[in-house]
Amino acid sequence: MKALQIAASGMAAQQMKVDVVSNNLANMSTTGYNARRADFADLHYQQLARPGAVTAENGSVLPTGVQLGLGVRPASVSVVIAQGSLQATNGDLDLAIEGRGFLEVTLPNGTTGYTRDGALKRTGDGLIVNSEGYEVLPGITIPADARSLSINAEGEVYAYFADTVQPQLLGQFTLTGFTNEKGLEAIGSNLFVETPASGPPQAGTPGQDGLGTLRQGYLEESSVDAVREVTELIKAQRGYELNAKVITAADQMLSATTQVR
C-alpha cells in the first residue's frame, strides 16, 4: 500500500520544517541573522493513464488522465533576505549594514568569507577583526594612541589623536554584493562563502552600485519574525499529526485485508 510510504515522506518533510523553524527561533538574538525557509516539492507521479492519451473505446482524448503522486521531498532551505532592525549600541566598532552587502573577512585557510555581523573588535596590535578574530578586509589597524574613532556611511575610518585637531584617515571598509545572495553557503559563526550559485563577489564602496551604507554605533538585529515562526511551527505539528493519522488508517485497512476469509 503506497499510502504508508507517502505519509512517511510527509512526516519526514514536516520534521524538517520543524528543524528549520527551531533554528530560526534559536537565532532570534543572533546579529545579522536572516531566517531560513524550507521549501518542498512533490515526488514522481505514477502514470496510470497519461493525460492526452487516446482511449481504445472510441478514440477520444483523455482530458486529465490518472496520475498518482508518490509523496513529497525537500526542495531547498533558502535564506529569506530581509533587513533586520537596527539597535543602538554606541560602540565605536559596531557597524550595521543598512541595505545590501557583506563585509569581507579572511578565513584561517586564506579564503574570503562574508558576513553582516558588524560587531567588530581590535586585536592587541590594533587590527580590526570580527568576533572570531578573523581580519576584516581591507585590513585596517588602529594606532595605540588613537583617542576615538569615527566611521562614516561610506566606510571611511578616521582616528582622532590628542595632539591634532584634524582626524587621520586609516582606511575604508568596502561592501560586497552578489547576484544571488541566497546561493551563498553558510558555514556558521555568521559567515558565508561564495558558491557557483551565488555568482562572483562584486566589491564596491558603501552607498554606491546598489550597496548599502554603514551605520557606526548600531548593530543589525535578527530578521526572525517570532509570530510567523510560531505559526509555522503549529502548522508543521498539525501536518505531522495528519500524516501520522494516514499511517494509522492505512495500517487498519491492511489489518482488515488480512482478516478477510
Image (cartoon, rainbow, N blue to C red):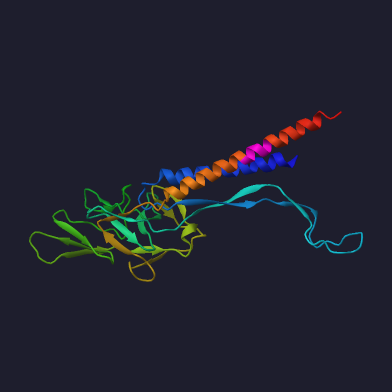
Q: Is residue 130 left or right of residue 72?
A: left
Q: Quadrant of residue 252?
A: top right
Could you tell me if residue 88 is visible in this image? yes
Q: Is residue 209 left or right of residue 4?
A: left
Prevalent SS, magenta region: helix
Q: Residue at x 40, y 51 (%)?
A: 33
Which contiguous range is marked in magenta?
242-247
Could you tell me if residue 146 is visible in this image? no
Name of the residue lying farthest toward the right: 57
Indicate whether 23 appears above or below 148. Answer: above
Please state which of residues 232 and 138 is positioned toward the viewer in this rendering: 232
Please state which of residues 103 and 22 is positioned toward the viewer in this rendering: 22
Name of the residue lying farthest toward the left: 163
Q: Quadrant of residue 23?
A: top left
Pinpoint residue 196: horizontal percent, then vertical percent. 51, 60
Indicate whether 42 appears above or below 211. Answer: above
Magenta stretch encompasses residue 90: no
Q: Residue at x 38, y 51 (%)?
A: 222
Pinpoint residue 25: horizontal percent, then vertical percent. 43, 44
Please state which of residues 86 and 183 is positioned toward the viewer in this rendering: 86
Q: Residue at x 55, y 44 (%)?
A: 236
Please state which of residues 210 and 259 is positioned toward the viewer in this rendering: 259
Q: Residue at x 9, y 59 (%)?
A: 162
Pinpoint residue 204: horizontal percent, then vertical percent. 36, 68
Q: Quadrant of the N terminus?
A: top right
Number of numbered discs: 0
Q: Quadrant of the C terminus?
A: top right
Pinpoint residue 246: horizontal percent, then vertical percent. 67, 39
Q: Quadrant of residue 4?
A: top right
Magenta stretch encompasses residue 244: yes
